[in-house]
């Protein structure tokens, strides 16, 4: 018998559940510390390595505060949060290559208008 993708097996002598992914058996998700791609109800890909298709998503605290961090690689890059309708951008909050924090909107997903922008403040010495 050939194992199929996402088949699961309980290995009694190890007391662990295993899943068959990418042609090999591995400990179940609960046992994994790091995965290259993860899709919840939708396929993940090389661009969107964490993909979730759901009515809601929850990221919650672990006792205290909760922060979602979007870290850009270099000052010439952009870090943004985009709101879409039918996979077409309608709103964006971003830290742009000019280091300005900006709110932009679009009626068609192609032409964007800046609604508010705050340039980087000078550092106090």
Image (cartoon, helix red, strand yellow):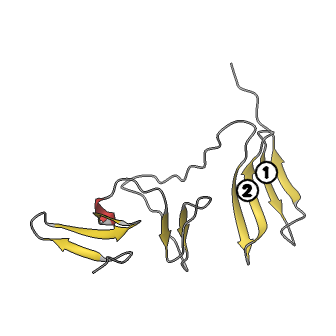
Is residue 113 placed above or below 96 in the rendered structure? below
Q: Residues within 10 Å of mark 2 (few under 14, many from 20)?
A: some
Q: Are marks 2 and 1 in contact (CB under 8 Å)?
A: yes
Please tell me which residue is depicted at 79% across the width and 42% down the height of the picture: 100
Q: Nearer the viewer, residue 34 or 11?
A: 11
* Residue labelled with disc 1: 102
Name the N-terminal-most of marks 2 and 1. 2
Q: Quadrant of residue 14?
A: bottom left
Q: Rounded to the nearest whole Å, what is the CA distance between mark 2 and mark 1?
A: 6 Å
The mark total stands at 2
Rendered location of residue 55, percent (x, y): 55, 80
* Residue labelled with disc 2: 93
Please tell me which residue is depicted at 87% across the width and 66% down the height of the picture: 110
Please tell me which residue is depicted at 79% across the width and 51% down the height of the picture: 102
Is residue 49 toward the left or the right of residue 115 in the image? Answer: left
Farthest top residue in view: 125
Q: Quadrant of residue 98?
A: top right
């Amino acid at each position: 018998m050939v194992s199929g993708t996402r088949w699961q097996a309980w290995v009694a002598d190890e007391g662990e559940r295993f899943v068959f992914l990418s042609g090999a058996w591995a400990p179940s998700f609960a046992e994994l510390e790091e995965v290259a791609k993860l899709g919840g109800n939708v396929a993940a890909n090389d661009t969107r390595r964490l993909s979730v298709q759901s009515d809601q998503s929850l990221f919650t605290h672990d006792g205290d505060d909760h922060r979602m961090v979007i870290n850009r690689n270099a000052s010439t890059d952009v870090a943004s949060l985009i709101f879409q309708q039918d996979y077409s951008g309608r709103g964006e909050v971003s830290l742009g290559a000019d280091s300005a924090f900006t709110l932009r909107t679009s009626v068609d997903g192609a032409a964007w208008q800046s609604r508010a922008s705050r340039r980087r403040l000078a550092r106090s010495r």
